[in-house]
Amino acid sequence: MCPHVSLPCLRQSRRRQTSLALKAHCAFNPKQARRSELLSRALCCAQAGRRASSLACILSRVAGL
């Protein structure tokens, strides 16, 4: 273990990995989604304050359908 990493930081990282693993079964797959679902996801991401680049990526996939 790296001496510069504190134990609480490691615990928090493991918790985050565990929660992501639990959510993996319901992950969003844009290749299987309908166009309307992609648009609603894009709008939801934009409202949540996500980066504009991820929104542009989703919208470019919609345009490619």
Image: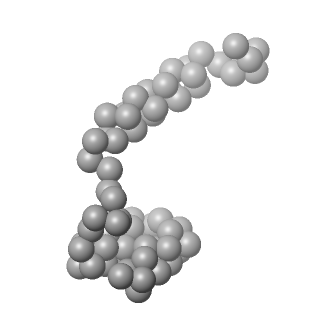
Q: Is residue 19 visible?
A: yes
Q: Does residue 9 lie above or below 61 as drawn?
A: above
Res 5 quadrant in image: top right
Residue for point 74% across, 17% down: 2
Residue for point 26% across, 47% down: 26
Res 23 quadrant in image: top left
Residue 54 drawn at (x, y percent): 50, 69
As drawn, which residue projects farthest toward the bottom?
A: 63
Give 63 or 2, whichever is nearer the viewer: 63
On-image quarter of the N terminus: top right
On screen, residue 21 versus residue 36, left or right, reads right
On-image quarter of the C terminus: bottom left
Give 30 or 21, whichever is nearer the viewer: 30
Res 47 quadrant in image: bottom left
Residue for point 31% across, 69% down: 41
How many numbered marks have been drawn onto this rendered protein structure?
Answer: 0
On screen, residue 9 versus residue 59, left or right, reads right
Residue for point 59% across, 16% down: 7
Q: Is residue 40 visible?
A: no
Judging from the image, the colouring scheme is one colour
Residue 38 drawn at (x, y percent): 31, 73
Q: Does residue 23 lie above or below 39 as drawn?
A: above
As drawn, which residue projects farthest toward the right?
A: 3
